[in-house]
Image: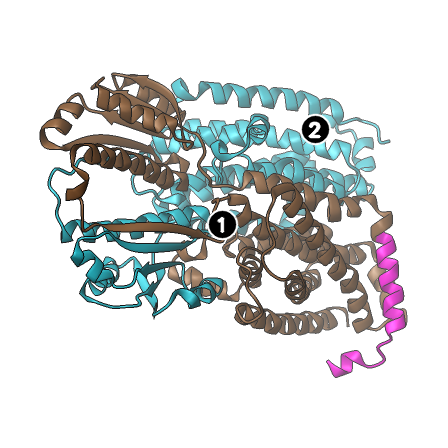
Chain colours: A brown, B cyan
Amino acid sequence: MARLLRGFSMRRALALAHAEVLHVVRDRATLVQLIVVPIVQLLVLANAATFAIHSSPIYVVDMDRSTASRAVTNRLQASDYFRLVGYSSSPGAANEAMLRGDVSLTLTIPHDFETQLVRTHTSVVHLDVNTEKGSAANIVQSYAVQILNAYAAELGAEIMPRESRTGRIVTVARDWYNPTLNYKHYMVPGILVALVTIVGTLITAQNIAREKEMGTLEQLNVTPITKAEFIAAKLMPFWVLGLVDLAAGLLVGYFVFGVPMHGDPFLLFFAAGVYLVVALAIGLWISTIVETQQQAMFVTFFLLMIYLLMSGLFTPIDSMPHWVQLASELNPVRHFVTIARAIIVKGAGLREIARPLGILAVYGVVVLTLAIRQYDKRSA
Amino acid sequence: MNALLGLLRKETLHILRDRRTLAVLILLPIVQVVLFGYTIRTDVKDVRLAIVDPTPDATTLGIRARFSATGTFRTVAVLHSASQLERLFQRDTAQVAIVFGPQFGETLARGDAAQVLVITDATEPNSGTGRQNYVNAVVQEYAAQLAPRRGDIRIETRVRSRFNPTRQSSNLFVPGLMAMVLTIVSALMTALSLTREKETGTMEALLASPLRPWQIIIGKVAPYVVIGFLSVIAVLVEARLIFHVPMRGSLTLLLFEGLLFILVSLSLGILISARTSSQRVAMMAAMLATMLPTLMLSGFVFPIESMPRALQLVSYIIPARWFVQVTRGIMLKGTGLAFLWPETLILGLMAVVLLVASARSFRIRLD
């Protein structure tokens, strides 16, 4: 490191950084890549990346055609979660709709549903869940069961006099941090992390690979510019750009999607500054192992895919197998996703995010050192 | 014909020589299967539970014991007041908390309704809801045991999971993964390899050669069709071996539909290359026009029904959406053309339109 910094001139580094900024501003393709693409991605992703259940199509096979069976059907229909797309007394059409993938759930009410309810106070219904819909299936099922149970409880309350129902345990539920259960409040902070990561890593890797490909890197190598100056000049503009993108994304999140900012924005930007060093250093490292832009893109894409999927961005880390959870400790994206969600959604302070932030800082130093050494070796 | 063979040979050599890209092309599908298989999961398990029990007694201890007995919950903290909960949640040490009311057991013994507050970290709404339901079930089960009430009405639900009884997420993403891999190989790589010839000026040499334009296209594109096909087979074999993903329908039909989808993606790649002059722009266009939609709007990871209406409409023109439906139909439900003809027809039409458009856009002259 000390050898690397010998003869470091801030003036030269800034001049080169200035040239870099001019390049970015002048080249429309890059500018689009840096500003328009992230914003479009945020707008589309925040809407598309959702596991929320809303008016899921269901089919009711009502073999009973009684007051009770109609009441059940009405309950399901009245809920926001479901949309009744078919109602018949035989299972044929329902099965076909299920095979076509048109319905997420079929409720079959047997012909003795009401009679059994009256006689034995217990009745059976059948739920066919279309698990082709993935995780949505579990949620759809639990909503349906909830509605059925609520109906049963209501019937029970009608039959039983109030006084005899004592000694009960009442559960009161509270949803903290996201009381409206809005999926966007969960996804937007995660998407912002993804965007900052992509901008930081991909652009750095591609940019240096381009200099290599066009031969301008060799020209730079014969100028008095030192390695450290070169790297600093390359990384600085993108570091700033990453923060600008984050700011723009936060504003879009706030004004378009109403994602609140519960924590301290400065803390978030501080953490982002640390994280961007990691992201940029990974980009720098990639650029040292590739020769063309195409390779840079492919290697970056490959690594980022692993990083992003294992970060808990789309699906909770806690649902993954234990060894994946352990491996994900090595993933910087995971830690920044944790930090971003903790600050934005939960309003966490420095003390609460100290652990992931510390890991990121260590990560930054290690990766940057490795990348610079690798860079030295390759071009020496 | 000889010239075409020569071009094919040259293209193949190019691909084989670029070791890094080749490595990524081969590794990508293989790693993706494992990654998606293990990471795209949303089961509720190993829930970190915090308990606030101001006045422990036999009842609260009974309920607490019940939570430990389920195996789904891990008690991370037992507190006397709720004031420290916030920090536990912010640090993600706890995901759900149950707060007993004061004198819980006494209240219950008196015959009054005793209150349990269930606080969930709902940052991620679905797992939040899932955990909440789980906690409620445990508490209610205990309550039912404590005071069995006669005359209670019960509607029992018998659940049957269609098409994917074990609810393995791998069964669902493998079809989507094939669409993803084919898009990367066919659309992205084709666009890049054609624009590279333009960028480096070698396209001129190719156009001046006795090769006809369609021969140039075939020569450039054929190796990627082969790679695409091989990756699909690799994904299928791997999915079968590691995750036991079923193949209930006809493999021939699946491969035929795969070919249709490859044609669509290739045409898109050619179209992109016709409109762009640098690899960087081609990459961006390919990412925006093919890869992102395939990942986000095909129903591969995120259910289309959950999206806003506008995006659902957009998804109709995404080829991957239809391809994913077809592959899921064949692999999971064992359906054939009798059910899948609309999707197949749409893919076929897309292939025809895009092929014609790309053939026309590939001009013999350079601008």
Q: Element under label 2?
A: helix
Q: Is residue B278 above or below residue B65?
A: above
Q: Which mark is residue A178?
A: 1
Q: Output the chain of dot 2.
A: B
Q: Is residue A290 left or right of residue B305?
A: right
Q: Is residue B328 above or below residue A42?
A: above
Instruction: Classify 10 Å Cα crowding around label 2: few (below 14), some (14-19), many (20 and above).
Output: some
Q: Output the chain of dot 1.
A: A
Prevailing secondary structure class for the magenta stretch in the rendered image: helix
Q: Is residue A191 left or right of residue B166?
A: right
Region of the chain picked out in magenta, as a range: A1-23
Q: Nearer the viewer, residue A162 or B171?
A: A162
Q: Residue at x 55, y 35 (%)?
A: B297
Q: Element under label 1?
A: loop
> Same chain for the residues at labels 2 and 1, yes or no?
no
Q: CA distance from mark 2 to mark 1?
A: 58 Å
Residue B159 in sight here: no
Q: Is residue B80 left or right of residue A38?
A: left
Q: Is residue A16 left or right of residue A248?
A: right
**What x and y, as percent, mark residue B189?**
65, 41
Dividing the picture into quadrants, the one containing residue A252 is: top right
Instruction: Classify 10 Å Cα crowding around label 1: few (below 14), some (14-19), many (20 and above).
Output: many
Q: Nearer the viewer, residue B261 or B61?
A: B61
Q: Nearer the viewer, residue B208 or A64?
A: A64
Q: Residue at x 87, y 75 (%)?
A: A9
- Check contact, mark 2 vs mark 1: CB within 8 A: no
Q: Residue at x 23, y 63 (%)?
A: B60
Instruction: Read off the residue under disc 2.
Output: B215
**What x and y, as percent, mark residue A213?**
78, 55
Q: Nearer the viewer, residue A221 or A142?
A: A142
Task: Tell me the amino acid under the disc marked 1.
Answer: Asn
**What x and y, as percent, mark residue B174?**
44, 41
